[in-house]
């Protein structure tokens, strides 16, 4: 038998999974139940041990019940907060602000629908130089949303009245010489995890389909302050998982037999189809990277803590990030410059400057690449990535081969996300409302939330200790490099960087033989979005992958 502890506090933590799985009433449990619960965590205590700890477990059960008598608001974070900064980390030098270039020679296209795929600077030029009004542009995108929504199923709410009011105000300000900047009058969409008063914030899930939160998410406030115009709340896969929501399945505009991937499904689909110039998404474990890849757009996941999550649904307090999906890297940089920064309502945010020196010689960037991961991918995606590497080399970039950290329990980290999600959605599970979610299979969010009740506190903390080890190993990997080139999927990069909080940008690399988009990912140092944005922009200036759009839109 394993007698690795006689400490009743530790025993209680290990066995709490059994207690949390009990119903909300005062249903009793027996010593036999405790003995059975041991098997879930691989322990075998003696009868004397169980006799000793059993009264403690009963008192603990009473304590659990007492905690539930005190409701928690959605925006209450745990007192223990994740800090992505590892030992030995030195903050990169950053520019403070950008003077965005707005070209003066942009004209309305002969084919009016081509406006749908203009970049932010192009649209800003038309507005600033009064070749189109924000109201006209807003009506254009509202019409496209309404036209293609039945096909793509990408929006929850088309915010007509709010959008037209914001556009009218933008036009009046511009007419009076009060130009706020490059986003002034530009329409956009946001993932339906972000609260906007007067509209449902459904989180994509049937239990919340009528939920209205009387709060404005900080990122929405910041975009409104920049003069941007919110035209739609876009689909999130149910509770930030996949592309299935209570109203259907969001489609990939490149192939309507495919889902848009998720969970920023609506943001990816709508941006790719030209229904919005850009959209906000969130990522915990791939939810910006994956829809950016599937739908062929550029997606930026900033450093953890760079962008406020106030007013945004939590899935994992220590892993959630907010970022843009857009036409290209420059558009992503423009949006990030507005939404980033310290927020008193989100204690994980940082007060750091952000800016990109677009004139910096990219040959001065120290670039690495995951050579073995790239070479072993024999798919069309791998071929496209290797062709993209040729573009980088033609640009004068000579990346150095490196490997992701070894001797890391990558497969064990998932319990961090699942345990934190289980805590946020405790009431959903205990009320039984989780049963009305659309998907109920083994890989569904509903099932994930139920099984989260069986994750021991000790294992959750051990996983976070291993996470600290991973953070140090990533620090060792990245300390000599500004950018790491990686496949977007098929290796450990996506999981690792979501755990460590490193920024990434997913870039289109063309199409496979089925005309489905493919991508690569650039990883940057913590808080150094500038380097990956710079390299991404030059790459896109020297290629045309970001200019590909799905036919028929």
Image (spheres, rainbow, N blue to C red):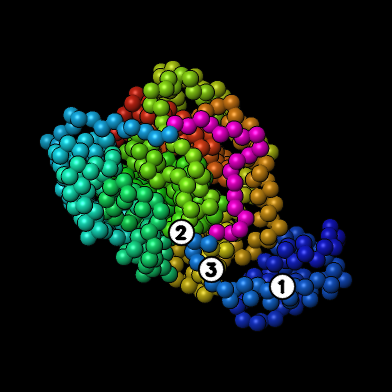
Which quarter of the image is occupied by the C terminus?
A: top left
Q: Which residue is mark 1?
A: 60
Magenta-drawn segment: 77-95
* Label 3, label 2: how far apart the Cα atoms are: 14 Å
Percent x, y of residue 15: 72, 66
User: Disc 3 vs disc 1: Cβ atoms closer than 8 Å?
Assistant: no
Q: Nearer the viewer, mark 3 or mark 2?
A: 3
| Mark 3 burial class by Cα count in 10 Å: few <14, some 14-19, many 20+ | few
Say how many tags the image has: 3
Helix, strand or loop for disc 3: loop
The outermost residue toward the right is 48
Q: Which residue is mark 3?
A: 72
Q: Which mark is residue 13?
A: none
Of residues 68 and 450, the one nearer the viewer is: 68
Percent x, y of residue 220: 36, 53
Badge 3 or badge 2: first in the primary sequence: 3
Of residues 528 and 271, the one nearer the viewer is: 528
The residue at the point 44 percent across, 67 percent down is 437
* Residue 468 lies within the magenta run: no
């Amino acid at each position: 038998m394993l007698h690795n502890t006689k400490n009743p506090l530790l025993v209680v933590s290990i066995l709490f999974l059994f207690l949390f799985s009990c119903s909300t009433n005062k249903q009793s449990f027996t010593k036999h139940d405790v003995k059975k619960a041991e098997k879930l965590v691989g322990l075998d205590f003696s009868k004397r041990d169980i006799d000793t700890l059993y009264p403690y477990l009963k008192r603990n059960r009473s304590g659990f019940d007492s905690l539930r008598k005190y409701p928690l608001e959605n925006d209450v974070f745990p007192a223990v907060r994740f800090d992505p900064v590892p030992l030995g980390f030195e903050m990169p030098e950053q520019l403070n602000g950008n003077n965005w270039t707005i070209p003066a020679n942009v004209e309305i296209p002969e084919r009016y629908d081509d406006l749908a795929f203009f970049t932010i600077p192009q649209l800003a030029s038309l507005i600033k130089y009064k070749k189109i009004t924000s109201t006209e542009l807003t009506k254009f995108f509202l019409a496209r949303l309404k036209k293609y929504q039945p096909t793509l199923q990408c929006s929850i709410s088309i915010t007509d009245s709010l959008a037209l009011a914001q556009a009218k105000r933008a036009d009046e300000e511009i007419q009076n010489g009060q130009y706020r900047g490059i986003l002034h009058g530009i329409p956009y969409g946001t993932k339906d995890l972000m609260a906007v008063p007067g509209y449902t914030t459904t989180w994509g899930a049937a239990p919340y389909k009528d939920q209205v939160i009387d709060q404005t998410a900080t990122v929405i406030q910041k975009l409104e302050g920049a003069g941007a115009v919110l035209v739609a709340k876009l689909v999130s896969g149910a509770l930030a998982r996949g592309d299935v929501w209570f109203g259907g399945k969001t489609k990939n505009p490149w192939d309507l037999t495919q889902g848009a991937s998720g969970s920023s499904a609506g943001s990816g689909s709508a941006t790719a189809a030209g229904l919005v110039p850009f959209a906000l998404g969130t990522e915990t474990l791939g939810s910006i990277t994956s829809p950016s890849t599937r739908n062929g757009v550029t997606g930026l996941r900033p450093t953890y803590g760079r962008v406020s999550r106030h007013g945004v649904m939590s899935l994992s307090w220590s892993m959630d990030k907010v970022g843009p999906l857009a036409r290209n890297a420059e558009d992503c940089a423009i949006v990030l410059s507005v939404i980033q920064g310290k927020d008193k309502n989100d204690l994980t945010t940082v007060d750091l400057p952000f800016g990109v020196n677009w004139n910096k010689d990219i040959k001065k960037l120290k670039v690495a690449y995951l050579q073995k991961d790239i070479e072993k991918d024999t798919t069309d995606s791998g071929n496209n990535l290797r062709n993209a590497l040729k573009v980088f080399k033609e640009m004068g970039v000579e990346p150095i081969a490196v490997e992701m950290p070894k001797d890391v329990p990558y497969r064990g980290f998932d319990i961090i996300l699942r345990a934190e999600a289980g805590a946020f959605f405790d009431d959903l599970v205990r009320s039984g409302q989780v049963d009305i979610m659309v998907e109920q299979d083994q890989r569904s969010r509903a099932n994930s939330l139920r099984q989260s009740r069986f994750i021991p506190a000790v294992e959750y903390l051990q996983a976070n200790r291993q996470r600290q080890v991973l953070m140090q190993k990533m620090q060792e990997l990245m300390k000599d490099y500004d950018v790491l080139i990686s496949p977007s999927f098929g290796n450990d990069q996506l999981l690792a960087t979501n755990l460590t909080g490193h920024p990434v940008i997913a870039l289109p690399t063309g199409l496979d033989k089925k005309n489905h988009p493919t991508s690569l990912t650039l990883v940057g140092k913590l808080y150094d979005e500038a380097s990956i944005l710079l390299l991404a922009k030059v790459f896109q200036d020297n290629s045309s992958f970001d200019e590909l759009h799905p036919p028929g839109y």
